[in-house]
């Protein structure tokens, strides 16, 4: 059973991360299993972009839940931005080193109050993946940081 993320406006970035992780832990594997055949075919054609197709289905519930209670989790899009999962900007990510069969890409999103535009903190989303075949060996994970300036996050 998938847990629907429920947020409220007074939450800290740590609480947002906890609720987000509960959602991801409940949703990632059933979605992965239901899409696996399609994603394996897509991986042969578009390689790593297949992971974006998966995140396009996994992440919107989390970002929609944040928006519904008065947060925003993305910055203004640029013309050449590659947007994944509604709010993940490819330019706001980096790939951690590791063997080809077990790499991690980390995306970051500064979460702000819609009313005041003040940052609450930053969510980091790590997705483990293989470059050899379509495979997500373990659940993606959210980490929370109180920092919100890019030079503090990089």
Image: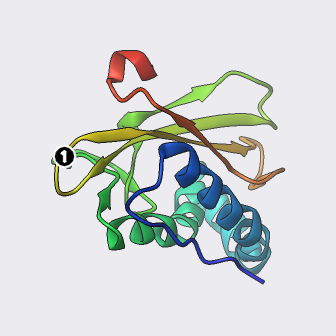
**Location of residue 83 with respect to 3 vertically, above or below:** above
Residue 26: quadrant of the picture: bottom right
Residue at 56% across, 44% down: 14
Residue at 77% across, 76% down: 30
**Location of residue 130 with respect to 24 vertically, above or below:** above
**Location of residue 139 with respect to 78 vertically, above or below:** below
Residue at 77% across, 32% down: 100
For the N terminus, the quadrant is bottom right
Left or right of 39 in this view: 49: left
- Residue located farthest toward the bottom when viewing the structure as drawn: 1
- Residue located farthest toward the top when viewing the structure as drawn: 151
- Residue located farthest toward the front when viewing the structure as drawn: 10
Residue situated in front as seen by the camera: 58 or 37? 58
Residue 125: quadrant of the picture: top right
Residue 67: quadrant of the picture: bottom left
Q: Point out residue 69 in the picture as x, y percentages from the top left corner.
A: 35, 69
Residue at 82% across, 51% down: 138
Residue situated in front as seen by the camera: 33 or 3? 3
Q: Point out residue 87 in the picture as x, y percentages from the top left corner.
A: 37, 56
Colouring chosen for the image of the structure: rainbow
Q: Secondary structure at mark 1?
A: loop
Q: Which residue position holds label 1? A: 117
For the C terminus, the quadrant is top left
Q: Point out residue 16 in the picture as x, y percentages from the top left corner.
A: 53, 54
């Amino acid at each position: 059973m998938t847990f629907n993320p429920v947020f409220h406006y007074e939450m800290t970035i740590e609480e947002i991360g906890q609720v987000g992780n509960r959602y991801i832990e409940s949703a990632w594997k059933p979605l992965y299993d239901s899409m696996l055949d399609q994603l394996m075919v897509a991986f042969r054609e578009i390689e790593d972009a297949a992971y974006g197709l998966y995140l396009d289905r996994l992440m919107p519930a989390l970002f929609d839940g944040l928006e519904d209670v008065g947060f925003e989790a993305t910055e203004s899009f640029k013309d050449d931005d590659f947007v994944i999962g509604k709010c993940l900007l490819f330019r706001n990510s980096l790939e951690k080193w590791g063997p080809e069969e077990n790499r991690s890409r980390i995306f970051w999103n500064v979460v702000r109050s819609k009313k005041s535009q003040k940052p609450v903190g930053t969510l980091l989303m790590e997705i483990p993946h293989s470059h050899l075949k379509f495979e997500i060996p373990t659940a993606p994970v959210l980490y929370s940081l109180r920092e919100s300036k890019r030079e503090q996050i990089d």
